[in-house]
Amino acid sequence: MSPDFVLVAGPLVRASSWEPTAKHLREAGYRVQVPDILAHHASPPAWRAWTRSLLDHIAPTSRMVVVGHSSASVLAADLAIKLPASAVIIVDGEVPPSQGEASPVRPALRDHIGSLVQADGSLPVWSKWFSGDPQRASLVGLDILARDPVAFAQFENGLPKMHVDWFDDTIELVSWDHVPAGLIQTSIIYDHAAVEARRRGWPLTRLQGTHLHPTLRPAEMADAILSMSRRLGAI
């Protein structure tokens, strides 16, 4: 029996970032759910409430593969024990702790966020965080996305406005490392995550791309997800 794929976007972008990959998986004959939390909330839910909000928009089935991109890696781990998940796949994100407190971003990025805070505590949208660092923007893939000004404007218009305090919340993960898990790395930003995945004995796939691979290289992304699912015994 084929699994349903649940593609979870990080809270800083819209679920539409997964739709190009979802299209390829559906064309390959798989059922795909792409819950869009920001479509149902006037303001972003608290980090600790994000999984509960996801569950409100996921239809559980008997077999599911949860795929979390970027900061959704923690959300995927949290969902793994709240759904009948046969596997978890992290795409270019942190390797979540096996249990215990998990923050939205790692300390180095939290420090960078602190330098961007406006007088009222609000932050520029995520795509503006790296405007002063062209190399980082290139690793993310924003330069490629910006080649189509209309598409880029639509992308930016959908990004949530976050308050700096949002990033100081935590999710308490219950032990989830009994669920088979693997990492697909698409940018060198997450070299450290690849090291941790290897340490845990996870299967690892490295793609030559950018952080926005699910949007920019969806066919390759879909193939990598299917391949990893097979390695994890989920297909």
Image (cartoon, rainbow, N blue to C red):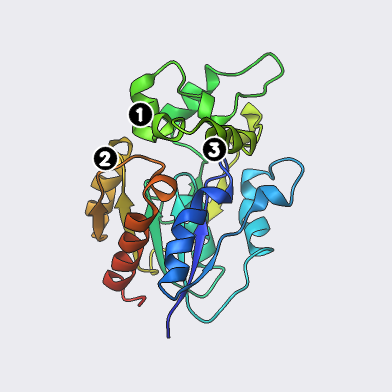
Percent x, y of residue 139: 34, 32
Using the image, tell me which numbered label, if any, was put on residue 191: 2
Q: Pointer 1: what residue?
A: 138
Image quarter in which the N terminus is found = bottom left
Give the quadrant of residue 209: top left
Tally the marks: 3
Considering only vertical position in the picture, is 179 above or below 41?
A: below
Residue under label 3, please give it. 151
Graded by Cα atoms within 10 Å as few (under 14), some (14 to 19) or many (20 or more), the crowding at tag 3 reads few
Between disc 2 and disc 3, the foreground one is: 3
Q: Residue sitting at 51 percent across and 48 percent down?
A: 17
Could you tell me which secondary element the residue under label 1 belongs to? Answer: helix
Judge whether residue 47 can be spotted in this image.
yes
Query: In the visual, does 200 lie left or right of 68?
Result: left
Asked whether, in this view, residue 94 is left or right of residue 42, the answer is: left
Residue 59 position within the rendered picture, expressed as x and y whole percent measured from the top left:
63, 72
**CA neighbours of label 2 inside 10 A, class few (<14), some (14 to 19), many (20+):** some
Looking at the picture, does residue 169 appear above or below residue 219? Answer: above
